[in-house]
Amino acid sequence: MLVTFSTKSHGNVIMFGDVAHSLITMMGFGTDVPGAIKAEDVACALANLEKKLTQIVQQQPEKIVPEIDNKDENETEIQIGLAVRAVPLIELLKAAISAKSYVMWE
């Protein structure tokens, strides 16, 4: 399942459902899809999200996971953390704050 975040002042951000639900929860909202944040609540949602992401980054350092590939057994891949995946949503929230606009997801 894909979740699309939107606001008037920024392009849409599309995420996989599990990642989107985690980020919505971190913002302090239920994971119901569709959902929305009122314009006056977006700044609080952003602060909540950034606080939770900071806590996660401090608790879980970046992990290197061996890549399953028959071509070269020595290759490794870096697992992309939630903080990195959240960057487009954070930018969308900041744009919504600047424009004093709501944020929706569906």
Image: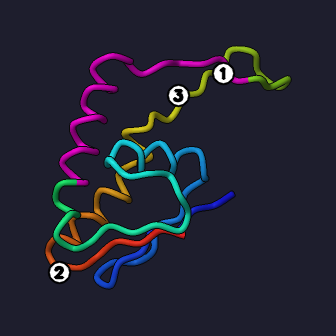
Q: Is the residue 32 above or below the residue 59 in the image?
A: below
Q: Dot 3 surroundings within 10 Å: few (below 14), some, or many (20 or more)? A: few
Task: Name the disc covering residue 14, or none.
Answer: none
Disc 2 residue type? Ala
Q: Are marks 2 and 1 in contact (CB under 8 Å)?
A: no
**For the magenta stretch, what is the residue range?**
45-67
Q: Is the residue 7 above or below the residue 60 in the image?
A: below
**Residue depicted at 53% across the width and 18% down the height:** 64
Please provide percent x and percent y for residue 20: 50, 51
Disc 1 residue type? Glu
Which residue lies under the disc numbered 1?
75
Q: CA distance from mark 2 to mark 1?
A: 45 Å
Which quadrant is home to the C terminus?
bottom right
Disc 3 element: strand
Which residue lies under the disc numbered 2?
99
Q: Main secondary structure of the magenta part?
A: helix
**Residue depicted at 48% across the width and 19% down the height:** 63
Q: Dot 2 surroundings within 10 Å: few (below 14), some, or many (20 or more)? A: some
Which residue lies under the disc numbered 3?
78
Q: Is residue 59 magenta?
A: yes
